[in-house]
Amino acid sequence: MSAWRMMRKVLRHPNDFYYDLQAPGMARWSHAILLILLAFAARMISILVTGYAFTTREAHEISFVYEFIWISVPWITWSVSNWAVSTILDGEGKFKEIAVGSAYALVPYIVFIVPVTMLTNLLSLDESSAYELLLSAIFVWVILLMLIKVKILHDFEIGKVFWITVLTLIGVFIIWFVGIILYGLIDEFVQFIFNLFQEINFRM
């Protein structure tokens, strides 16, 4: 099944979609990467088409790298954490199904964020509540798809879905915390080596 047909199915029949995703050959890494790139493109376009009154950042403050990290890091860390937690607690989902299923949960964002953001060119700041409501609806839709994915791929009951979700979020924050500490240590080590070579060159 093509990525386009699967995107339509996850929007219209999410339960059937996630049951089908467990069939051999349905979960594809190429689809996951395509969806993450589409989500990144949708975010960049939504930033560009945001109405002047709703703009919170100057053009020079927008970074392609930062915006790509904003999309890709939560997806990767959520997938790793959810796989680790569910494996410990008898979940049935495989890592590939979790990662691809999580990428498909971003389809409402990919499809609707640009049209909703374009409304900021028609609305005044006094009418911003309508924009914020639509924006919230997109994110709630994404979260609902994530919860449906956890329930179906791991074959959990509703209560366990919420428990696993809380543990997964805790795992995500632990991964980020460890990543930040490692980044700081590596940065200091590289600075130390660089300064050491500078000192050696100076004395020679």
Image (spheres, helix red, strand yellow):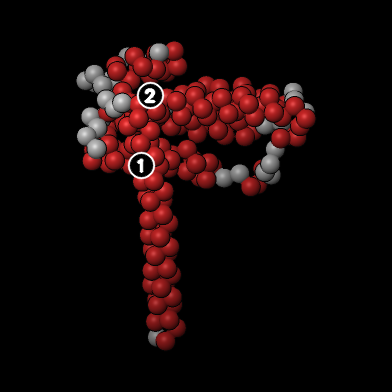
Residue at 37 percent across and 50 percent down: it is 175
Q: Nearer the viewer, residue 4 or 138?
A: 138
Image height check: is 172 above or below 38? below
Q: Nearer the viewer, residue 133 or 43?
A: 133
Residue behind mark 1 = 167
Side of 54 relative to 145 (left or right): right
Q: Is residue 4 visible?
A: no
Quarter holding the C terminus?
A: bottom left
Side of 17 relative to 134 (left or right): left
Does label 2 or label 1 sit earlier along the sequence?
2
Residue behind mark 2 = 148
Looking at numbered disc 1 in the image, what kind of residue is underneath it?
Leu
For the residue carrying disc 2, how many other residues have a C-alpha within 10 Å: few (<14), some (14-19), or many (20+)?
Answer: many
Percent across and percent down for residue 79 are: 34, 37
Residue at 53 percent across and 41 percent down: it is 67
Classify mark 2: helix, strand or loop: helix
Percent across and percent down for residue 184 are: 43, 62
Q: Nearer the viewer, residue 53 or 198?
A: 53
Image height check: is 143 above or below 73? above
Looking at numbered disc 2 in the image, what kind of residue is underneath it?
Ile
Classify mark 1: helix, strand or loop: helix
Image height check: is 124 above or below 9? below
Q: Nearer the viewer, residue 35 or 85?
A: 85
Percent across and percent down for residue 174 are: 38, 51
Residue at 65 percent across and 47 percent down: it is 60
Q: Residue furthest bottom?
A: 203
Q: Residue furthest front?
A: 159
Image height check: is 58 above or below 140? below
